[in-house]
Amino acid sequence: MKETALVTQIINFWKKKGAKVQKNHGTAFARAGTPDLFILYQGIFSAQEVKAPGKNEGLEYLEKRREHLYENEPTPAQHYQLLEWQKRGARVGVARSVEDSWRIMGLK
C-alpha cells in the first residue's frame, strides 16, 4: 500500500469517530520533519508520522538507513519533530496502519 492511500485510510477512520484531523501538506514554507497528521480525539492530541509498511532488513536496508534514504523510516528531522511534540504532551509515533494510529493514541 502506498503512503498516500494509508494516510487517507487513517484520516477517514478518525473522522468517522468524530475526531478533528489535520493533514500536513509539506510545502516550501513548512518546517522540515513536521508530522503528517495531527489528531484530536476525546481530549487526546497526537502528532503522527505515516509510513507505508515495508520490509526493513538486509544489507540494502542497512546501507540506505545509514544514508537516511530508506523510504519507510522517519528521517532524523521527523524523529526530532516527533520528540518536540512529545515533550509538549502530544502522543506521538509512526503509523504504518490504522491500528498503529489507534495504538499511538493510547486507546484500548
Image (spheres, rainbow, N blue to C red):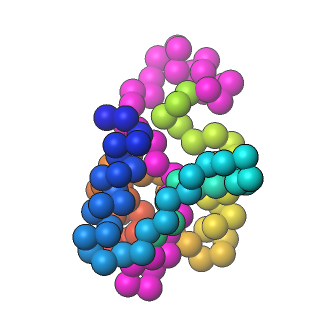
> Residue 55 location, x and y as percent?
39, 27
Q: Is residue 19 above or below residue 28?
A: below
| Residue at the image point whose x is 64% and y is 55% from the top | 34
- Does the magenta segment cover residue 42? yes
Q: Quadrant of the C terminus?
A: bottom left
Of residues 13 and 107, the one nearer the viewer is 13
| Residue at the image point whose x is 32% and y is 69% from the top | 15
Is 87 situated left or right of 20 in this image?
right
Q: Residue furthest bottom?
A: 43
| Residue at the image point whose x is 38% and y is 71% from the top | 106
> Residue 6 location, x and y as percent?
35, 46
The quarter of the picture where residue 98 lies is bottom left
Q: Is residue 93 above or below residue 14?
A: above
Q: Residue furthest top?
A: 59
Confirm whether residue 9 shows in the render.
yes
Of residues 72 and 39, the one nearer the viewer is 39
Q: Which residues are magenta?
A: 40-69
| Residue at the image point whose x is 56% and y is 72% from the top | 90
> Residue 64 location, x and y as percent?
60, 21
Is 81 situated left or right of 6 in this image?
right
Q: Is residue 10 above or below residue 87?
A: above
Is 63 situated left or right of 104 in this image?
right
Confirm whether residue 92 shows in the render.
no
- Does the magenta segment cover residue 56? yes
> Residue 42 location, x and y as percent?
38, 84
Is 4 situated left or right of 68 in this image?
left
How many numbered discs?
Answer: 0
Q: Quadrant of the N terminus?
A: top left
